[in-house]
Amino acid sequence: MWKYILKRLLMMIPVLLGVTFIVFFIMSMTPGDPAAIILGDQATPEAIAQLREELRLNDPLLLRYVQYIVDMLHGDFGESYKNGISVASQVLDKFPNTAILAIAGILVALAIGIPVGIISARKQYSALDNVSMVFSLIGVSMPVFWLGLLLSLLFALKLGWFPSQGMGKGFLPLLRSLVLPAITLGTGSAATVARMTRSSMLEVIRQDYISTARAKGLAEKVITKRHMFRNALIPIVTAVGLQFGHLLGGAMLTETVFSWPGLGRLMIDSLNSKDIPMVLGSVLFMTIMFSFVNLAVDIVYAFIDPRIRSLYKKAGFRKRRAIAA
Amino acid sequence: MSEAVKKTQRSLWMDAWRRLRKNRLAMIGLGFILLLVVLALFTVAVDIVTKGTFYDEHVIKQNLRLRLQGPSAEHIFGLDEFGRDIFLRVIWAIRYSLFMGTVAIAISVVIGSFLGAIAGFYGKVTDNVIMRIMDIFLAIPSMLLALAIVAAFGTSLTNVLMAIAISYVPTFARTVRASVLTVKDQEYIEAARALGASDARIIGKYIIPNCLAPLIVQASLGVAGAILSIAGLSFLGLGIQPPTPEWGSMLSNARSYIRDGWHITVIPGLMIMLTILSLNLLGDGLRDALDPRLKN
C-alpha cells in the first residue's frame, strides 16, 4: 500500500513540472512590462531598467522557469507585484476559506446526491424516481453563479435568513454565512452524484448475489446498505473525485457571487490587476491541490474495494500489472 | 460489394436517428436548440439587412428613464439597468453562446481527434508523449486553464474561444484514443493494410468513422460545458465585454441591481439553463441512440 502511494507521488512530479511550465509560459505572454506596472506611471526608464534587472526579466524564459522551480521548492512563490507581500503567505492565508467552502459543497453534494440516487434506483420508474431525475437534470444544467444569485435574492434579500455577502466570524456566524454558498456550490455536484449513484445501483441491483441475499431472508435495509450500496460505491467515488475539479472552478464563481474571501476571489482580483506572480502562484496551488485529491480518491478505492486492496497487498509488481491489464 | 457496405453504413445512422426520434426528451432538447439556431440566424439577418442600425438602436442604446422596468406587453421580459429591452438582448446574445460554444468544441474535436488517433494508432513512444502531455493539461482544472489564457492574452472573442477549445482538447484526445484502440486490431483494418492503404487513409477512412459515435456524444455534452464556461468567464468579467449582449455578462451586471428587479437576474440565467438542459437531453439521447448497449 505504501509502495503504491509512493509510486503515485513520484508519478505526480513530472505532471506538476509540466503544469508549472504551461502556466508559467502562458503567464509570461502577458503583454506589458511588469517592472513598469510595479513602478507606475511616474517611473524613469532607468528605474524600470534597474527593476527589470532585479526581477531577472532580461533572462531567457527557460532560465527564469528553472529559477522559479528552484525557488518554489524552497517554498518561495515570489512576491506580489501589487503589495510586495509574498505570494505563498497570501495563498495560504486564503486557502482555508476555499477549503471550508469546497468541503461544505462536497458534503451538500453527498448528503443530497447519495440518498436521492439510492431511492431512485430502488424505486426505478416510480413517480419519485422521475421527479428526482428531472430535478437532477436541471441541477446539472444550472450555471452555478445563477443559482447563487437566485438563492441570495430569495433567502438573503427577500427573507433575510442568511447573509448575502462575506464570511462570518465565529462558529455560528460562519455556519450561517456558509449555508448559501455551500448549497450553490454543491447543487450541481449533488445532481451528478445522484445520477451516478442511481445508475451504479441499478447495475448492482440485478446481480445474482442480491437475489441470494433476498432468498436467505435478509431485510431489505440490510441488502441495500451492505450488498448494493457497498458494491455500487466505486463509480460514485470516481464521480465525487472528478467533481472536485468542477468545484474549484465553481468556487471562483461562488466566491465572486457571495464575496467569499477565498483563493478564487484572490485569483480574480490578481488577474484584474495583472499581478502575474499571484495568478501563477494561486493557479499552481489549486492545481497541486487537485492532483492530491485525485491521488486521495485512488487511495480511497483501495480502502473500499477489497479486490483492489489485496492486489496491492499480496501480488508482486509484475503480477499486479498483469491483473491491471 | 462496396454498395452493400454503403447500405449497412447508412442504415446504422438511420437506425440511430429512428431511436433518437422515439426519445421524447431528446427531441424536446433538439427542438429548443433548433429554435435558438433559427432565432440566432434571424438576428444575424436583421443586422445585415439594417446594417446594424436596429442593433445599435434597440440592443445597445441606453434609455435611463425607463431603467429596470418590469415585464409588460411592450417589453415581455422587461428592461435592464440601462433601460434596454431584455428580450432583444437575450435573443441577440444567442449567437455568442451557441456559435462560440460550437466553434470552440469543433476546434477541440479536430485537434483532439487528430492527437488521439495518432496516439492510439501508432502507440508506443508517440502514444506516451502525446498522452502524457494531455495528462498535464487534464491536471489543470479547465476553468483555471481558460482563465489563465484569457488573463495572459486578453479578453477578445478569439482568445475566449481558444481558451475554451484548448481546455477541451484532452477530453477528445482520450475519447478518440480509447476507441481507436478497440478498432485498430479489427480484421477490416488489416484487410485495408493488405490492400496497400496508407496510414493516413486507414485512419481517415476506416478508423475515424468507426470512432464517431462516442465522439458525437462527447461533443454534444462538450458544447454544453463550453457554453457554461463562456458564460462563467463573462460573469467574472473575463469573457465577452459589455455592452455586447451575452448571458453571463448580463448576469454579472444584474448582480449590482439584484434588489431592484428580479427579471434582470432571472431571465438571462434561465436562457443559459434551458440551453444547457436541452444540450444535455440531446447528448443523453444521442448516447442511447448511438450505443443502445449503454442504456440501462
Image (tube, coloured by chain):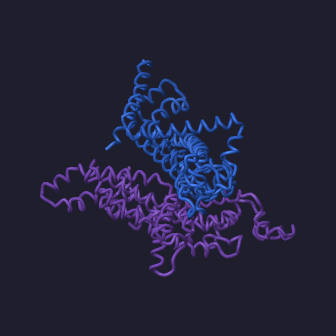
Q: Position of residue A49 (x, y in %)?
A: 83, 67
Q: Position of residue A153 (x, y in %)?
A: 51, 64
Q: Specify whether residue A114 is in view.
A: yes
Q: How many marks?
A: 0
Chain that the image shows in blue: B
Q: Position of residue A131 (x, y in %)?
A: 33, 52
Residue at the (23%, 59%) spot, across then down = A224
Q: Say above or below: A120 vs B113.
A: below
In the image, taking residue A47 as reference, residue A115 lies left or right, namely left
- Examine the image and state in which quarter residue B14 appears: top left
In the image, taking residue A247 as reference, residue A129 lies left or right, namely left
Residue at the (57%, 62%) spot, across then down = B260
Q: Position of residue B139 (x, y in %)?
A: 53, 57
**Closer to us: A70 or B272:** B272
Residue at the (68%, 57%) spot, across then down = B152
In the image, taking residue A109 as reference, residue B149 lies left or right, namely right
Q: Say above or below: A240 vs B131.
A: below
Chain that the image shows in purple: A
**Closer to us: B118 or A99:** A99
Single out the residue that lies furthest toward the front. Answer: B73
Residue at the (41%, 33%) spot, across then down = B186
Single out the residue that lies furthest toward the bottom. Answer: A170
From the image, which quarter does the C terminus of chain B lie in?
A: top left
